[in-house]
Image (spheres, grey):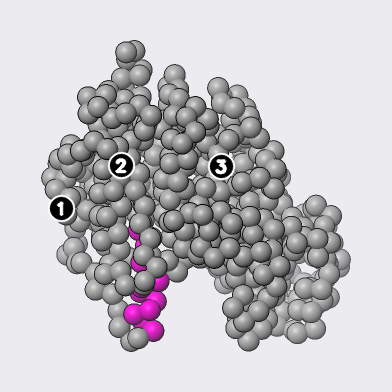
Amino acid sequence: MSKSRTTLPTIVGVGQTVDRSCEVAEPIDQMVEATAIALADSNVAIDPRKIDIIGTVGGLWEYTDPARLVADRLGASNARTLLSGFGGQTPQSLVGHFAQRIASGELDVAVIVGAEAVATRRRLRAEGADMAITEQHGAMPDERFKPKIDITTDYETELGLIMPVLTYAIFEVAIRHARAESVDAHLSRIAQMCANMSAIAAENPFAWHRNALDASEIATASQKNRLVAYPYTRSMCAEPTVDMGAAVVLMPDSSADELGIDTALRVYPHRIIEAEDTPSVTQRVRFDDSPALRAIARRWADEPLPAMCDIDLLDLYSCFPSVVSLSSEIFGIDEGRKLTMTGGLHFGGGPLNNTVTHAIASLVDGLRSEPGVFGMIHGNGGLITKHSVGAYSTTPPDHFAVIDVADDVDTSGDRTAQQRDAAGPFRLEAYSVLHDRDGPTNAVAALLDDDGSRGWATTTDQTTFEALMSEDLVGVTAHRSVDGLLSL
């Protein structure tokens, strides 16, 4: 065995949990269960005392060092602990982080785990109660990984752009215009994309929503499927109200050999390529493109990997249709093919930052059933901001690498922000109309000046809502008052 093969990192176990009863005691229980499943997944007993590190994906809970609770319950007495920041790309970034340390000989056995119990917590709060969480009395993790960063400016936050559903919907309108799609044709396309994911979720035992919906049901607004942010109905949006957990176990090939883990159960990360788009949405060149994803695609083509369009198994991050439209177009992937292993973030479930752990677990299962083929996962964090694209196969690579292509991201056309009180005529670039259960509440629009600077305007005018939602108004002249109000 070559030295490189000896320390080659491999995934030997995965575990997933889903509890649709909304009766979860607390998220840590799901983390422990998912980790235990992952440790047993190789059909070989992995002694928890051999675990060097447990990394937990940051979540919507109050634990200060959840990995220590997992370690204590499983008897992983020698494990160091790590807690990550936020971002949908985080689980795959953690795979890369631990795989690099395994390849260098620093780590032997590493675990990545996360869980959310938002569905149970919401039920309890509706009943006037709250979830009892194990207190840690200030315990801190041994390591932190990519702490949370701001993804919007103060002004963008005031406008509501911190809400992903609003910002991704604005991107959606820009994509529709760039593709020269009619309102009806565009709605039909993204509804069919979501229906395809729904069909996949119906076959996934770990999906949150397993009742398949057709494109008409997804596209049509109703009491159960209301508009959230035009043009998105609820069925097009990520579903965070879930009780789900997932875990991944990595080790070097040499340790897998020593334990007698069947080579057919080993899945190897080949490359993880990462980049970030400009954090401020206001400053981005275009809403219908991603320079970071383009940089990743260029580098992928230079690596010893199949072409992206030829990858056998895929999971493209799918919190909202706009990011799927962008990634599939940039990667040269047909939107009509299978784009997810889980069913996407609505039907499969979107447990906040841990969604990609479920995608990795499902991909591992898929690759084991089709030895030798390649799989790819796109993780997305923020507002189409932070990207991680990974290649996996049961066939081992010559070596593993994490590649940061930040220097290759073209930000030369980044825009300047208009003054908040800038008034006058501008070109309407993109927009969305937010809704509550009673109907539309306010619209947010991006406006371009002749010099290319970008600003924003809002309105609560019902007539304007109707105009924005009835036809494509991108490119028309719109007016903004000194206090930021939009008129057409």
Disc 2 residue type (three-letter): Asp
Q: What residue did someone put label 3 on?
A: 314
Q: Earlier in the sequence, mark 3 or mark 1?
A: 1
Q: Earlier in the sequence, mark 1 or mark 2?
A: 2
Q: Position of residue 139 (x, y in %)?
A: 19, 58
Query: Secondary structure beneath disc 1?
Result: helix
Residue appearing at x 34%, y 80% in the figure: 124
Instruction: Give the CA separation, mark 3 to mark 1.
Output: 35 Å
The image shows a total of numbered marks equal to: 3
Query: Between 215 and 322, which is closer to the camera in this rendering?
Result: 215
Query: Secondary structure beneath disc 2?
Result: loop
Q: Earlier in the sequence, mark 3 or mark 2?
A: 2
Residue appearing at x 55%, y 34% in the figure: 405
Give the farthest residue toward the right: 476
Inspect this view and state whether residue 10 appears: yes
- Mark drawn on residue 442: none
Instruction: Give the CA separation, mark 3 to mark 2.
Output: 22 Å
Magenta-tinted stretch: 115-126
Query: Secondary structure beneath disc 3?
Result: strand
Q: What residue did someone put label 1 on?
A: 72
> Where on the picture, by quarter, is residue 95?
top left
Q: Position of residue 294 (x, y in %)?
A: 65, 38
Residue appearing at x 20%, y 38% in the figure: 45
* Mark 3 or 2, closer to the camera: 2
What is the magenta segment's predominant secondary structure?
helix
Q: What residue did someone put label 2 on?
A: 41
Q: Position of residue 300 (x, y in %)?
A: 59, 30
